[in-house]
Each structure stands twice: as C-alpha cells, then as structure tokens.
Image (cartoon, rainbow, N blue to C red):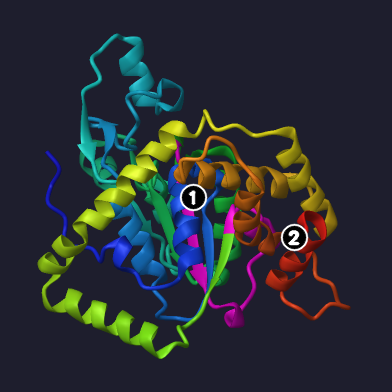
C-alpha cells in the first residue's frame, strides 16, 4: 500500500509555460535525456511543475528494505545489498512507492549530499555503517536544485561525476560504498544572479526559459486556479483528475513505445546538419536532440520521428549548447529559429 500523500497542484492545471511542461514530459518519457534546466523569473511555477509531474507519474516498484529503491526488474542497476541477496537466491520482495522528488538546498553539506558514516550506530554499537544522502534518496526519481547557478563549486563537481556515471562513490571514514544514483536532474534559477558552469550546463539535456505571463486573461487564470487550489485542495485535485489520468496514460504508453519508434537516416542527417550549422561542440547536442525528438514522437503516438519533432525540441535541446557570438546580439532562441529556417526551410 502507498501512504496517502498531501495534495499537489495538478500538472494539467498549470496555465501556460508550455515549453517547460513539454520538456518535463519528454524527460518523463525518457529519463536518459538528462533532465531540464529552467531559467526565468521567480514565481512562474518552476517548483510547482516539478512536484506536479512527480505526482502525476505512476508509482514505481522498489525492492523492500532497499535504501536506494532498486528496481526489482533491473538487476544490472542493483545496489550491493540487492546483488548479494539476489546471488543468494533470496526472494526480493517489492512494493509500490511514489516517485521521489528530493530538494537539494544551496547550503547543504557534502556529507548530506553523498552520505556519510552513521555516527549514532558508530557510537552506540561500534559499527561502521553508511547513512545514505540526498543522492541515494533521489535514485530513480527527481533531484531538484533551486538557484542551481549559485551552487558551490565542489558540489557542482560532485554532481557532474554522478550525472555522468549514474553511481555515487563514497570513500571516507574507513567506508567504501558504491550505490546507484540515477535521477532526472531539474535545476532552476535566475540568469541575472549568475551563470552556470559550462561543465554542469552541458549535463542538462534540455533548457527552457520561463517568463511571467504578459496577457491579462492568462494572469487572471493563473491566480484563479491557484486560489481555488488553496481554498479546497481535494476538490481542485479531483476536478483535474481525469486530465492528469489521461496524461499519465500517454506518458506510460510513450515509455513502452519508445524502443519501437523509427528513426530514419534522413532525420538523423538533418539533426546533424542543424547542429553543425549552429556550431555546437561535441556530439552531445545531436544525441540529445535525437533522443528528445524520439521521446516526443513516442508521447504523441507517432510511428516515426519526423522534422516536426526535431523543430519542436530543437530550442530546448540546443539553446544552452551554443557558443557565444560577439557579432550576434540576438538570443539563442532567435539563432536556433534562423538555423531551423536555413536547414529545414520555411
């Protein structure tokens, strides 16, 4: 049984911010894309969208008594304890648990993030035991960092290593622990308060810009829905339940269909042409662009990836990978739009 959770603002009820919502849905369909970076004004629904998406997703199967929530159907990603139990042919009981959403505050210590020696057990029992940190709790879920551009450098280095390997390795106080830490990284921040280090920026699969709504009707709608939610959370959630349920079914179906959707050489060549035209470094841009286009096509029940999918995912997949051009004062979004016209035509 899953414990009842407090009501969360429904994902389907979020007004506007279509690019942000689509980017999060794409990463929910294919978590290997690498997460979402959301830059923009405060109070535009960034943290609301993350928690709403996690609440929207179906509960996941996790091994009982596993501190890392290992997937019983994925032995290759087991932690050491689950490997030992599986090797001994011990039955791995499992249960349904909600998808975790873990906040990583700016002032957090490194021990709190990666885990450390359990001092209570060390002092009372004389036993060296590992106390898992935030990375362990976020495994198979979401790790959310607000004001990610203000994160301390040593934590940035740590996140880069874990995001690349999918594992957290702890070597301290006589402990040697290695455990799975695969999560969708969601970062948010205000670009006016500082830039993100390029190494971490490149680890985000998608990047979106959010702005305060400028249309009167949309702003009124945002305030109206939030007020209704605050006054009666249960009734508001119930009213939007069928919309969230339909979206959940589409995400689950998209995950199942992901491996079947076709990707032609022509689409792959067009994705590569676009990245070459924009002068992106490395090949991660092409890989992310193709993965995001495939996830979008799968979510929309397409049988194959086409140029319309590439067009829609190109801005969030590429805008944070462009080199700065001192002779071009236009924003990255405008540069991508021009490149799309040059490469794909009108």
Does residue 332 appear in this view?
Answer: yes
Disc nearer the start of the sequence (2/1): 1
Does residue 117 appear in this view?
Answer: no
The residue positioned 83% from the left and 52% from the top of the image is 276
SS class of the residue under badge 1? helix
Would you say residue 186 sits in the magenta stretch?
A: yes
Residue range of the region highlighted in magenta in the rendering = 180-206
- Apparent side of residue 169 relative to residue 342 in the rendered image (left or right): left
**Foreground residue, 67 or 55?**
55
- Apparent side of residue 122 relative to residue 328 in the rendered image (left or right): left
Residue 340's mark?
2
Residue 187's mark?
none
Residue 96 coordinates in the image, percent (x, y): 21, 36
Q: Is residue 318 above or below residue 282?
A: below
Q: Residue under circle 1?
A: 26
Q: Quadrant of residue 69?
A: top left
- Apparent side of residue 37 relative to residue 323 in the rendered image (left or right): left
């Amino acid at each position: 049984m899953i414990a009842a959770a407090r009501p969360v603002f429904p994902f389907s009820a979020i007004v506007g911010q279509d690019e942000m919502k689509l980017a999060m849905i794409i990463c929910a369909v294919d978590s290997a894309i690498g997460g979402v970076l959301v830059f923009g004004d405060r109070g535009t629904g960034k943290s609301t969208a993350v928690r709403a998406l996690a609440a929207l997703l179906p509960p996941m199967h996790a091994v009982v008594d596993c501190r890392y929530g290992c997937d019983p159907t994925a032995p290759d990603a087991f932690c050491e304890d689950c490997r030992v139990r599986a090797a001994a042919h011990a039955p791995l009981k499992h249960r349904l648990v909600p998808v975790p959403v873990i906040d990583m505050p700016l002032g957090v210590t490194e021990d709190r993030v990666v885990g450390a020696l359990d001092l209570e057990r060390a002092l009372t029992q004389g036993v060296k035991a590992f106390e898992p940190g935030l990375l362990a709790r976020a495994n198979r879920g979401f790790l959310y960092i607000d004001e990610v551009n203000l994160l301390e450098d040593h934590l940035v280095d740590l996140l880069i290593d874990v995001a690349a390997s999918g594992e957290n390795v702890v070597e301290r106080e006589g402990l040697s622990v290695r455990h799975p830490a695969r999560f969708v990284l969601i970062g948010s921040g205000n670009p006016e308060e500082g830039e993100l280090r390029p190494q971490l920026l490149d680890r985000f699969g998608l990047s979106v810009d959010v702005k305060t709504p400028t249309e009167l009707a949309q702003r009124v709608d945002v305030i109206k829905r939030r007020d209704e939610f605050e006054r009666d959370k249960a009734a508001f959630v119930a009213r939007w339940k069928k919309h969230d349920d339909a979206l959940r079914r589409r995400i689950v179906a998209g995950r199942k269909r992901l491996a079947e959707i076709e990707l032609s050489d022509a689409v792959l060549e067009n994705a590569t042409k676009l990245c070459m035209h924009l002068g992106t470094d490395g090949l991660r841009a092409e890989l992310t662009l193709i993965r995001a286009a495939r996830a979008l096509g799968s979510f929309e029940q397409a049988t194959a990836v086409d140029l319309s999918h590439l067009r829609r995912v190109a801005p969030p997949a590429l805008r944070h990978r462009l080199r700065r051009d001192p002779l071009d004062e236009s924003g990255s979004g405008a540069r991508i739009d021009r490149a799309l016209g040059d490469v794909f035509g009108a």
